[in-house]
Each structure stands twice: as structure tokens, then as C-alpha cells.
Image (cartoon, helix red, strand yellow):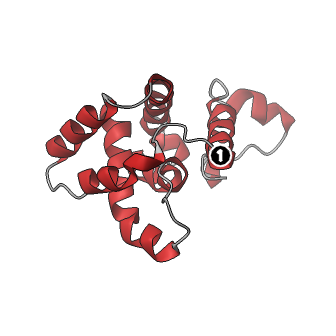
């Protein structure tokens, strides 16, 4: 899976699993990822904000990206804000263990951006063109939320 132990730390038997799972973070991360991926309703980003979010990701200064996201979140439904308040600190916690799990903030942003920030159309070209900016936004949220 994408949120995993590194190959060197992979458990090799039933006794290793109990010792090596750090507070079941791996299990929780896999459940969250599946929930977000399979959800028909947006978990964090309402779809009508997609292009505005991509435009925020195009800003060249990270401080401007954070400010744009902060301003945007003020208009989000409360459930979306609450979901972000739980999700991004959790992803930051995973990134903090990147020495062990090999999943830093950028890697997590690459994995989660397509499921968190879904394109409003089925055009794969649009998704590919905007992926860089979606990753910038998700990485900024993991780093600063």
C-alpha cells in the first residue's frame, strides 16, 4: 500500500506485527484513504471550489498559498472544515515518521491529492494538467494546517 512500512521493516511473522505497528497509524491511514477515495460526497474540498483551489496552487510563494487556502476555508461548510482539521494533522503525523515509513509530506500529497481534490470533469488531461498544483495545495495543508 501507499502508506506502509518500508520494505526493510516489513513484518515477517505474527509476532512482528504486534511490535511494529506504531499505534495502528498504518491501519487508520489506510481506512481514511479508502474512505476518501470511495466517497461520493467531498470530504474536504467542495467541488465548486476546484478551479479556485488550483489557482491558489499556482501561486509562487508558499505564504500566498497558505493565505489563499485560509481565506477559502472560511467559506467552506463546517463539516468540511472539521474533516480537514482531523485529516491534515493526521497526515502531518504520518509525515513526521517518514524516516520509518518513507512517506514525507510531498509523498503523502501525491497520494492524497487525486482523492481529496477531484476534478469536476472526467477529462484526464485536465487532471494531469492540474496535478502539480493540487499536490502543492495538499502539501501546504499537510505542512501548515
In the rendered view, would you say 12 is above or below 20? below
Q: Secondary structure at mark 1?
A: loop
Vertical placement of 36 versus 87: above or below? below
Identified at 35% across, 38% down, the residue is 141
- The reply, left or right, for residue 77 in relation to residue 52 is right
With respect to residue 85, does 132 lie above or below? below
Q: Is residue 30 left or right of residue 15?
A: left
User: How far across and how far down the image is residue 95, in percent?
Assistant: 44, 39
In this view, the residue in front, 98 or 12, is 98
Front position in the image: 119 or 93: 119
Mark 1 surroundings: few (<14), some (14-19) or many (≥20) residues within 10 A: few
Which residue is at the front of the view, 76 or 44?
Answer: 76
Residue 36, percent from left and from top: 61, 43
Please report the residue visible at 33 percent of the width from the left and 32 percent of the height from the top. Answer: 73
Q: Position of residue 97 (x, y in %)?
A: 48, 36
The residue at the far front in this view is 48
Mark 1 = which residue? 40
- For this rendering, which residue is in front, 144 or 68? 68
Amino acid at each position: 500500500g501507499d502508506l506502509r512500512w518500508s520494505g526493510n521493516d516489513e513484518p515477517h511473522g505474527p509476532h512482528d506485527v504486534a511490535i511494529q505497528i506504531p499505534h495502528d497509524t498504518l491501519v487508520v491511514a489506510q481506512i481514511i484513504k479508502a474512505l476518501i477515495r470511495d466517497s461520493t460526497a467531498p470530504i474536504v474540498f467542495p467541488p465548486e471550489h476546484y478551479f479556485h483551489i488550483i489557482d491558489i496552487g499556482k501561486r509562487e510563494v508558499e505564504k500566498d498559498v497558505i493565505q489563499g487556502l485560509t481565506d477559502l476555508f472560511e467559506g467552506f461548510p463546517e463539516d468540511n472544515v472539521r474533516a480537514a482539521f482531523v485529516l491534515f494533522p493526521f497526515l502531518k503525523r504520518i509525515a513526521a515518521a517518514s524516516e520509518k515509513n518513507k512517506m514525507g509530506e510531498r509523498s503523502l500529497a501525491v497520494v492524497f491529492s487525486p482523492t481529496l481534490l477531484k476534478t469536476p470533469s472526467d477529462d484526464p488531461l485536465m487532471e494531469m494538467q492540474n496535478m502539480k498544483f493540487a499536490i502543492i495545495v495538499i502539501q501546504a495543508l499537510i505542512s501548515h494546517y
